[in-house]
Image: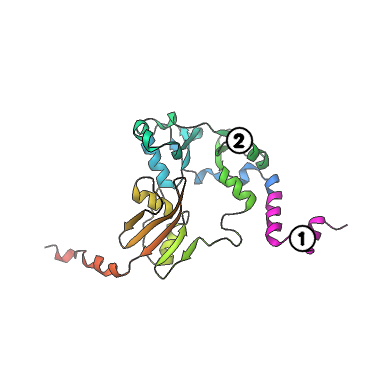
Amino acid sequence: MPNHYQTGGREGVLDEEERQRLQRALRFTDASAKEVMTPRLDMAAISSEATVEQAIRKCIGSGHARLPVYEGSLDNVVGVFDIRDLTESNYDEFADSKVENEASQTLHVPESKNVDTLFSEMRENRLHMVIVVDEFGATEGLITMEDMTEEIVGEILAGDEETPIQFAGDDTILVNGEVNIEEINEALDIVLPEGEEFESIAGFVFNLAGRLVEQDEEFDYENVTLRAEQVENTRIQKVRVTVDRDTVGAVDEDIPDENDAD
């Protein structure tokens, strides 16, 4: 007896994209929290003793608008800090406040938790982030609603979607915010620095600005101009990186030779 799913594919009822989407959906129903989570080693987090201002800088450095808040160690996550809950009108009021006072509640789930069930619970309770723990209650990782969505519809860059780096000329590229700085350096043959608190181009721009960035803002680093091409909910989605090759020589000429110091 033929399998209906296979038959549908052979008869052209399902195209390849639909087949892949269905396969992901089927895997999603059987997946566990551990399979979907961001591992502990890759987690950025904030101490409950930090001030709101320090928490904002941590968010900017990591490129995330939302981070877990821990007390003592990552094994004791007490809430979630969301930079989007702050506005310019209340920033001054809360800047020196302890971040634990501004953190919202989160949910701790076992690593064996069924992802399909968890997805429903997160939607019902309007939770954007949950913490995954092992059988002893130690933190294993975290899951965001974005993780859940990507798991069922596929990776953001999968299929025929746009590539993460698009050339708009020999010296200009349009890149997704999560692209690693190293990839951008290779693409344009430049040397943007990689900091301890950021690896993505979005994190670099946030760090360069030292504050939340608005769409279409431009920032200069040496002979490179970075433009926040697309910003959604304070998160930099796309950056236009342009190199001015003509200024390289001029910049080099301005650097004094150590032998000329005298």
Quadrant containing the C terminus is: bottom left
Quadrant containing the N terminus is: bottom right
- Dot 2, how many residues are within 10 Å of its Cα: few (below 14), some (14-19), or many (20+)? many
Number of the label disc, if any, that sits on residue 72: none
User: In the rendered structure, which amino acid carries the disc numbered 2?
Assistant: Val
Mark 2 residue element: strand
N-terminal-most mark, 2 or 1? 1
* Nearest the eye: 148 or 196: 148
Q: What x and y, as percent, mark residue 241?
A: 40, 61
Task: Tally the numbered discs.
Answer: 2
Q: Is residue 128 left or right of residue 58?
A: right
From which residue to which does the magenta span run?
Answer: 1-26
Q: Is residue 154 left or right of residue 84?
A: right
* Nearest the eye: 147 or 112: 147
Q: What x and y, as percent, mark residue 4?
A: 82, 56
Whether residue 143 is situated above or below residue 4 in the rendered picture: above
Q: Nearer the viewer, mark 2 or mark 1?
A: 1
- Determine the residue positioned at 85% across, 58% down: 2
Residue 3 part of the magenta-drawn span: yes
- Determine the residue positioned at 14% across, 62% down: 261
Would residue 96 be seen by someone viewing this image from the given angle? no
- Dot 1, how many residues are within 10 Å of its Cα: few (below 14), some (14-19), or many (20+)? few
Look at mark 2 in the image and give the residue it sits on. 109
Number of the label disc, if any, that sits on residue 13: 1
Q: What x and y, as percent, mark residue 189?
A: 39, 67
User: In the rendered structure, which amino acid carries the disc numbered 1?
Assistant: Val
Would residue 15 be seen by someone viewing this image from the given angle? yes
- Determine the residue positioned at 29% across, 70% down: 246
Q: CA distance from mark 2 to mark 1?
A: 39 Å
Secondary structure mostly seen in the magenta stretch: helix
